[in-house]
């Protein structure tokens, strides 16, 4: 029966080690959480007022600005890849040199914004508005944009994107 007692002792040690491992992992995650919250791309801006705020050069990839008001804000050079902008307002916003690759922008107002040299590749912008938006050098390759918006943007499309090397007119599929 001595071997049974030893087996129970070993088993109890294994269980205790397992529990200590779990507790240690949970504590490590809990202690790391405040640092993660400080990162720009971990913040959820859904339903917030970001009007006039400065996000220039920030990594906002994967963030949500759903139904946010970002009018007159500055996103110049920001990484907005993979963001969700559904029903957001980006009126008169500085979006120069921003990366919107694989962004979902359904029903977003970009009217009057500056999208010079923006990368809007593989993005979805259904029912969105680009009225009076500066799109010089913007790349909209493989983006899903309403035909009427594409037609209107083709009237002012010009330039070549400095990052991708793609002409704005070509990325929109404009006919000469």
Image: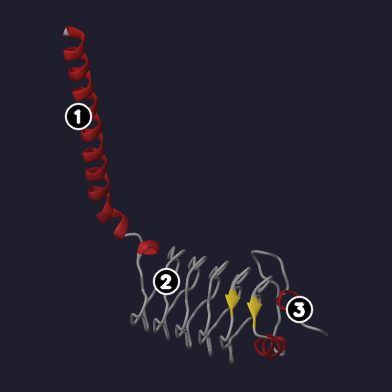
Q: Where is residue 34 in the image (x, y as percent from the top left)?
A: 25, 56
Q: Position of residue 10 (x, y in %)?
A: 22, 18
Residue at 16% in and 7% down = 2
Residue identified by numbered label 3: 173
**Mark 1 residue element:** helix
Q: In this view, does 157 lie to the left or right of 60?
A: right
Which label belongs to residue 16? 1
Examine the image and state in which quarter residue 170 appears.
Answer: bottom right
The local crowd at label 1, few if under 14, some if 14 to 19, many if 20 or more residues have their Cα within 10 Å, is few
Q: Quadrant of the N terminus?
A: top left
Residue identified by numbered label 2: 64
Please report whichever mark, 1 or 2, sits nearer to the chain's N-terminal start: 1
Please report whichever mark, 2 or 3, sits nearer to the chain's N-terminal start: 2
Residue at 55% in and 82% down = 114
The answer for how far apart the CA atoms under marks 1 and 3 are is: 64 Å
The answer for how far apart the CA atoms under marks 2 and 3 are is: 29 Å
Which sits in the foreground, 117 or 70?
Answer: 70
């Amino acid at each position: 029966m001595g071997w049974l007692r030893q087996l129970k002792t070993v088993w109890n040690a294994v269980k205790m080690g397992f529990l200590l491992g779990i507790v240690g992992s949970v504590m490590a995650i809990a202690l790391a959480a405040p640092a993660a919250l400080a990162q720009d791309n971990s913040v959820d801006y859904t339903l917030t007022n970001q009007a006039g705020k400065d996000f220039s050069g920030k990594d906002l990839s994967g963030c949500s600005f759903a139904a946010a008001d970002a009018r007159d804000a500055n996103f110049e050079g920001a990484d907005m890849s993979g963001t969700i902008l559904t029903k957001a307002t980006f009126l008169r916003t500085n979006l120069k040199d921003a990366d919107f690759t694989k962004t979902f922008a359904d029903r977003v107002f970009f009217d009057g914004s500056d999208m010079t040299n923006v990368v809007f590749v593989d993005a979805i912008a259904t029912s969105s508005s680009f009225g009076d938006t500066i799109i010089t050098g913007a790349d909209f390759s493989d983006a899903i944009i309403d035909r009427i918006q594409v037609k209107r943007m083709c009237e002012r499309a010009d330039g070549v994107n400095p990052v991708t090397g793609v002409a704005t007119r070509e990325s929109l599929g404009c006919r000469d």
